[in-house]
Amino acid sequence: MATKDLSQYDFNSVPSAESMKFGLVVAEWNPEVTFALAEGAIETLKRHGAKEENIILKHVPGSFELPLGAQFLAEFTDVDSVIVLGCVIQGETRHFDYICEGVSQGIKDLNLKYNKPFIFGVLTTDNQQQALDRAGGKHGNKGDEAAITAIKMLALKHSF
Ligand code: DLZ
C-alpha cells in the first residue's frame, strides 16, 4: 500500500505565517516520537515565516490530556491556532481505543467551540516503528503536515 509522504507539499501553495500565532501542545508519552513531531512542526512554521515569539510550546503527560492542554492555550493565551501532537501505540488492551476516541472527539469539539483551527497531529499506530516512520522517518513527519494544515486553515479563516 502506498503511504503519503507527510512532509511533501508545494511550498508556494502555503500562505505566509508571518502574522500568525500558534500554540503547540505535545504529549510526553512516546517522547522519541512526539518530540520529533514538535521539532518538525516548529521548523515548518518558521520556514513559512512564523516568528519564534509567536510560537508557544506546552507539554501534557499523555495524549488523553491533549484536548484540555489545547483548551488551556485557547483560554489563557492569544494564539490563533493550536497544533496538537501525540502518539498512541496499540497495546494488549482496549486502552488504545479509549484514548484515541477521547482525543479525536475532544479536538473536534474544540475546533467548533472556539471557531479556531485545532490541528489533530496524533499518530495512532500498531507499533513504535510505524510511529517513527511518520515522525521524520521514511514516511516524513506528521508534525510538518500539522503545521501546514494550521497555516492553511488560518488563511482560510482570514479569507472571509
Ligand atoms: C496510559 C497510556 C497508555 C497505555 N498508552 C499511551 C500511549 O500510547 N500514548 C499516549 O500518549 N498516552 C498513553 N497513555 C497515557 C494516557 O494518555 C493518559 O496520560 C493517562 O491515561 C492518564 O490520563
Image: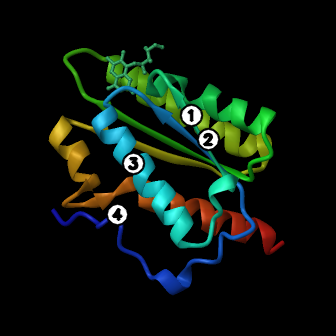
Marks 3 and 1, how far apart in space?
21 Å
Front of the two marks 2 and 4: 4
- Residue position for label 3: 37
The three-letter code of the residue at mark 2 reads Lys
C-alpha span from label 1 to label 4: 23 Å
Distance in Å between CA atoms under marks 2 and 1: 5 Å
The residue that mark 2 highlights is 108
Residue bearing the label numbered 4: 6
Q: Are marks 3 and 1 in contact (CB under 8 Å)?
A: no
Query: What percent of the width, then of the height, locates residue 141?
Result: 34, 57
Q: Which residue is mark 1?
A: 105
Query: Which colour scheme appears in the figure?
Result: rainbow
User: Foreground mark, 1 or 4?
Assistant: 4
- Left or right: 116 with respect to 144? right
In the displayed structure, 106 sits above or below 123; it is: above
Mark in front: 3 vs 1: 3
